[in-house]
Image (cartoon, rainbow, N blue to C red):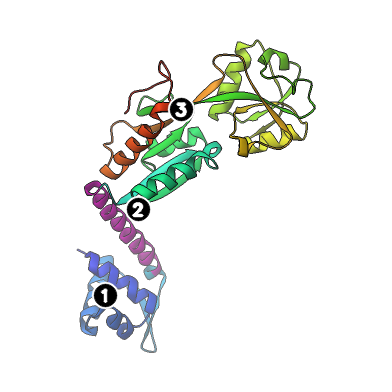
Amino acid sequence: MTTVDELEWFVVLAETEHMTQAAERLSLTQPTLSRALARLERRVGAPLFDRVNRRLRLNPFGMIMLEHARRGLAELAAAEERIATLRDPDHGTIRLAFLHSIAAGLMPEILRVYRAEAPGVRFELTQAAGHEIVEHLLAGRADLGLTAPRPEVDELGWTGLYRQQLCLAVPDGHPLAGREHVALADAGDEPFVTLQAPIGLRRLTDELCARAGLTPRFAFESTEIGTLEGFVAAGLGVAIVPQPRPQRAEPGVRYLPITDDSAHRMIGLSRLRERPLPPVVDRFARFVAARFRDGVEAGRDRARVW
């Protein structure tokens, strides 16, 4: 059976293509390395190098072996890191997926504060649409996901963090721009720019329009809220978007709160129910939930913590 050491030795040998240099780098004797290569070649049933003028040249069999050896060693290193993560809440890696629409405001603040508390923690970040975050969680590619609205997937647990007001974005100078708030029915004759299905905010847009008795005319569909706001500023249409922070508002756009009580979305933290969270991930999840607890409204929008 091929050992991990032999795979590591083979990779070094493939990189140097020289028996003596590889042996020196590995602090091995040349005969030891030569015997290990012979065992590996017997194991796979093919020579892995061509011998040319006392040098080794990786052949097509060796190239296949190198690809899989590197992949196997990387998987082993990842497994060792995950096991270390399970044992130590102060170190390890948190795989976090989050929405495009919170990338510029919410995410940097969360990470900045948490890294000050746990400097030994590393993050693997994925920015994606809500339905893509669900896929990452179900496939085990992410430990946690910041999503909105709540995923309609039984396998996922979810904790509501905070309620974000939805607004009707209109260009400056629009007849509705001078209002403090707006009923969505008042925009029934306007062209809309919106996100593409199945993005979560598109679902909320469709639901709000249906509640207002509207069949909106879509002038453009995008994948990012920033693009919608830019097109609103250009006068292409109006859009239903989250209330931005003041410093994040698009120039040339007025954000009018919608009078419908359901005109909001809930930002929450999702995870796979059946997979226990490693301590390093669980600590971060509880930190995030506690940080937002005071801002979450009581009632049906508040989910239990995991």
> How dense is the environment of label 2, judged by Cα within 10 Å: few (below 14), some, or many (20 and up)?
few
Classify mark 1: helix, strand or loop: helix
Identify residue for label 3.
162
Q: Give the range drawn in magenta.
A: 63-88
Hey, which quadrant is residue 142 in on the image?
top left
**Of residues 131 and 113, the one drawn nearer to the viewer in this rendering:** 113
Quadrant (top left, top right, bottom left, bottom right) of the N terminus = bottom left
Give the answer, above or below, for where 34 lies relative to 79: below
Residue sitting farthest toward the bottom: 53
Is 142 on the left-hand or right-hand side of 189?
left
Please state the horizontal and vertical placement of residue 209, each as a whole percent of the image: 63, 16
Classify mark 3: helix, strand or loop: strand
Q: Which residue is drawn at 52% across and 37% down?
A: 102
> How dense is the environment of label 1, judged by Cα within 10 Å: few (below 14), some, or many (20 and up)?
many
Give the label on residue 119, or none. Answer: 2
Q: What residue type is labelled 1?
A: Leu
Please state the horizontal and vertical placement of residue 177, each as a whole percent of the image: 74, 23
Give the answer, above or below, for where 69 lies relative to 84: below
Asked if residue 45 can be seen in this view, the reply is: no
> How dense is the environment of label 3, judged by Cα within 10 Å: few (below 14), some, or many (20 and up)?
some
Identify residue for label 1.
37
Q: For the residues marked 3 and 2, what is the alpha-carbon distance in whole angstroms? A: 26 Å
Is 206 on the left-hand or right-hand side of 156?
right
Classify mark 2: helix, strand or loop: loop
